């Protein structure tokens, strides 16, 4: 059986990693059977989550994983025009190579309360004796990545201003459509939902989250996908469906 390795579920959303959430959402949208295995990035083939294993082979990076799922199991993008495919690629790059870095900054650098919440969610599976050491080392590493990407060189207000431009573009392009490219979900929706639910549906407070929550169509979009593809996600206290 196809296995998906990703962070443990937390915060009442499918995954705290936009990329893990993207792959699981693609699998659910495409009705691809799979087992979920909790993991940390240290064990991943490229040192990042998610990765999958199938037929004895491990594969990392959500883009290559989705290519593999398309060619081996089910292609949610079949039937799209070349123009739609171009938009899909461009918006996924906006989400994953730009907006993602503002979201990452909110968690690992922007505010200490956010870091504490993030730390607890990611590093709790580690033994207490090494938890803080590993978490602090990891935090420095991610901050170096944010700086290396270029996003981390900007002022806080500039980082969030750039993120807000991306949110504007996404909200405008989605408009009143149920999914980004029309009436049915495609790979672009797996990517968009993966990041949008991680900005507006998680307990990391920032101007980016506040701004995303002002876009009613993005909120309804997240709810639509949660309701249709994650009906099994329930409130940990009440047991009620979350959406
Ligand atoms: N391009 C990769 C990005 C994956 C990624 O950045 N994963 C993060 C979690 S959101 C990670 O595992 N980071 C660990 C690290 O950078 O050390 C993909 O599409 O899968």
Image: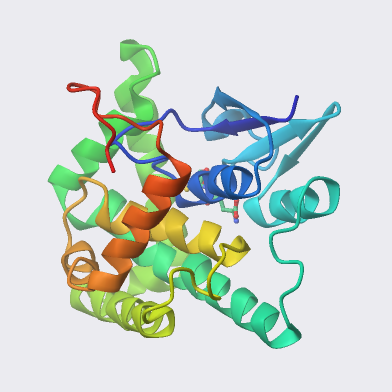
The percent position of residue 4, horizontal first and vertical second, equals 63, 33
The percent position of residue 148, horizontal first and vertical second, equals 48, 65
Q: Which of the two residues, 107 or 181, is positioned nearer the viewer here?
A: 181
Q: Is residue 77 visible?
A: yes
Q: Residue at x 69, y 78 (%)?
A: 85
> Is residue 33 depicted above or below 112 in this figure?
above
Q: Which of the two residues, 118 or 68, is positioned nearer the viewer here?
A: 68
> Is residue 22 depicted above or below 120 in this figure?
below
In-image side of 77 versus 175 (left or right): right
> Which quarter shows the N terminus?
top right
The percent position of residue 2, horizontal first and vertical second, equals 73, 30
In-image side of 25 versus 65 (left or right): left
- The part of the image, by quadrant, that contains residue 152 is bottom left
Q: Is residue 104 visible?
A: no
- The part of the image, by quadrant, that contains residue 131 is top left
- The part of the image, by quadrant, that contains residue 88 is bottom right
Q: Which of the two residues, 180 or 91, is positioned nearer the viewer here?
A: 180
State how the image is colored: rainbow
Q: Residue at x 17, y 72 (%)?
A: 214
Q: Residue at x 19, y 77 (%)?
A: 157
> Which quarter shows the C terminus?
top left
Count of numbered labels shown in the rendering: 0
In-image side of 130 versus 77 (left or right): left
In-image side of 59 versus 152 (left or right): right
Q: Which of the two residues, 109 or 199, is positioned nearer the viewer here?
A: 199
The percent position of residue 178, horizontal first and vertical second, equals 43, 69
> Is residue 136 depicted above or below 194 in this figure?
above
């Amino acid at each position: 059986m196809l296995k998906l390795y990703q962070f443990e579920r937390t915060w009442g959303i499918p995954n705290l990693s936009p990329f893990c959430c993207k792959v699981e959402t693609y699998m659910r949208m495409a009705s691809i059977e799979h087992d979920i295995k909790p993991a940390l990035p240290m064990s991943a083939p490229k040192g990042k989550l998610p990765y999958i294993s199938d037929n004895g082979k491990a594969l990392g990076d959500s883009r290559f994983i989705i290519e593999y799922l398309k060619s081996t199991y089910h292609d949610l993008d079949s039937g799209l025009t070349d123009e739609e495919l171009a938009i899909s690629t461009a918006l996924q790059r906006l989400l994953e190579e730009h907006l993602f870095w503002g979201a990452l900054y909110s968690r690992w650098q922007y505010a200490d309360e956010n870091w504490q919440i993030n730390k607890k969610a990611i590093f709790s599976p580690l033994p207490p004796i090494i938890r803080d050491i590993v978490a602090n080392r990891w935090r420095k590493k991610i901050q170096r990545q944010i700086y290396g990407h270029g996003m981390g060189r900007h002022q806080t207000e500039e980082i969030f201003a750039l993120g807000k431009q991306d949110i504007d573009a996404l909200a405008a392009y989605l408009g009143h459509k149920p999914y980004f490219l029309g009436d049915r979900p495609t790979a672009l929706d797996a990517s968009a939902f993966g990041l949008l639910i991680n900005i507006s549906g998680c307990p990391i407070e920032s101007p980016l989250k506040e701004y995303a929550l002002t876009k009613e169509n993005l909120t309804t979009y997240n709810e639509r996908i949660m309701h249709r593809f994650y009906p099994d996600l329930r409130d940990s206290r009440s047991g009620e469906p979350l959406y």
